[in-house]
Image (cartoon, rainbow, N blue to C red):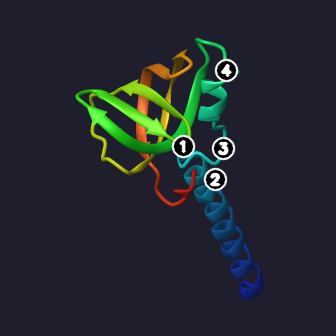
Amino acid sequence: MPKKKGKSVAKIALVLLVIAIVTVGIIAWHDGLIGLTSINDINDGLVPIGTAVAVKGEVTLRVGNVITISDGLNFVLIEWTGASTLNSVVVVRGVVSSIVSLANVSSVDIVWFFSEY
């Protein structure tokens, strides 16, 4: 007995939908739509020193390995030896070391699609 095409097409559509949802979720997490800490909260002292955070902002200044990440009005300083481009929007993962700086920065990732911060 031949297979019914309707069920086969529905299974393929469901698999593609699941893949699309997972992909969007991964991109949203990478681009900082999920789990971000506000730079303003860090600057206001609302985030305890030693807290692991992810922040999103624009690379506004680089002097050697010291980089300023700004959300427009607020900023944090990080030390990063890897690549970074001025005016690029990035998600930075590190540990709050003061009200204006992050230490132990583990990544500075350029945002793929969701560039507003």
Q: Which residue is mark 3?
A: 34
Drawn side of residue 49 relative to residue 80, left or right = right
Q: Which residue is mark 1?
A: 71
- The amino acid type, in three-letter code, at marker 2 is Gly
Residues marked 3 and 2 touching at CB (< 8 Å): yes
Label 3 residue SS: loop
Q: Is residue 4 visible?
A: yes
- The amino acid type, in three-letter code, at marker 3 is Ile
**First in sequence: mark 1 vs mark 2:** 2
Tell us which disc is closer to us: 3 or 2.
3
Q: Residue 83: x and y, percent?
A: 27, 39
Residues marked 4 and 3 touching at CB (< 8 Å): no
Q: Residue at x 77, y 79 (%)?
A: 7
Query: How far apart are the two marked residues, 4 and 3, measured between alpha carbons?
Result: 17 Å
**First in sequence: mark 1 vs mark 4:** 4
Drawn side of residue 95 relative to residue 81, left or right = right
Count residues near mark 1 (Cα–Cα under 10 Å), then give few for <14, some for 14-19, many for 20+: some
**First in sequence: mark 3 vs mark 2:** 2
Tell us which disc is closer to us: 1 or 2.
1
Query: How far apart are the two marked residues, 3 and 2, measured between alpha carbons?
Result: 9 Å
Q: Residue 82: x and y, percent?
A: 28, 33
Tell us which disc is closer to us: 3 or 1.
1
- The amino acid type, in three-letter code, at marker 4 is Val
* Quadrant location of the N terminus in the rendered image: bottom right
Query: How far apart are the two marked residues, 3 and 1, measured between alpha carbons?
Result: 16 Å
Q: Residue 91: x and y, percent?
A: 49, 41
Q: Which residue is mark 2?
A: 25
Q: Residue at x 55, y 36 (%)?
A: 74
Residues marked 4 and 2 touching at CB (< 8 Å): no
Query: How far apart are the two marked residues, 4 and 2, measured between alpha carbons?
Result: 26 Å
